[in-house]
Amino acid sequence: MTHPTQAPTTLTNIGVAMFTVADQDAAIAFYVAKLGFELRADVRFGEHGEMRWVEVAPPGSVARLALNPAMGGSEPGGSGIGVDTLDVLGEHERLSALGVDVDPKPFRSPGAPLLFMLRDPDGNHIAVVEPGPGA
């Protein structure tokens, strides 16, 4: 298999992942109250302030998650990200007790780390991963 030659770039970081949500306030409540994320931004923009930019992130994370209303034909749900934890089993137990839509139990496939999937109220997927050595 041949790989393309790397193009020169000034890009340095994956800063913001974006999820489409049906209700930004409900999404903020889920990510802050259930997942324990911080609200990093909630600002109005546009010519008349008709749009809203919302960002959440786990405490200490450089990368952020933007919670966007449906735009340009997009529908809520269907996106996915991964988040790290040092305690997959404990986090699964904590989120299950809060009623979050999580897989029945964490799993590990050959060559992959221990993880489980959860779904936000809009159907976006989050893989909760316990990074292995060298991660």
Image: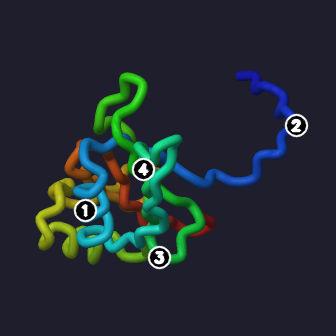
Q: Residue at image x 27%, y 57%?
A: 25
Q: Which residue is mark 2?
A: 8
Q: In the rendered image of this protein, does residue 83 appear above or below residue 51?
A: below
Is 49 or 34 nearer to us in this picture?
49
Residue 30, which numbered label? 1
Q: Residue at image x 46%, y 44%?
A: 48
Left or right: 101 with respect to 40?
left
x and y percent of residue 10 in the render?
A: 83, 45
Is 88 or 124 nearer to us in this picture?
124
Classify mark 3: helix, strand or loop.
loop
Q: Which residue is mark 3?
A: 59
Classify mark 2: helix, strand or loop.
loop
Q: In the rendered image of this protein, does residue 56 appear above or below residue 49?
A: below
Q: Which residue is mark 4?
A: 52
- Point out the tag, 3 or 4, that comes first from the N-terminus: 4
- Point out the tag, 3 or 2, that comes first from the N-terminus: 2
Tag 2: residue type?
A: Pro
Classify mark 1: helix, strand or loop.
helix
**Separation of residues labelled 4 and 2 (CA atoms):** 34 Å
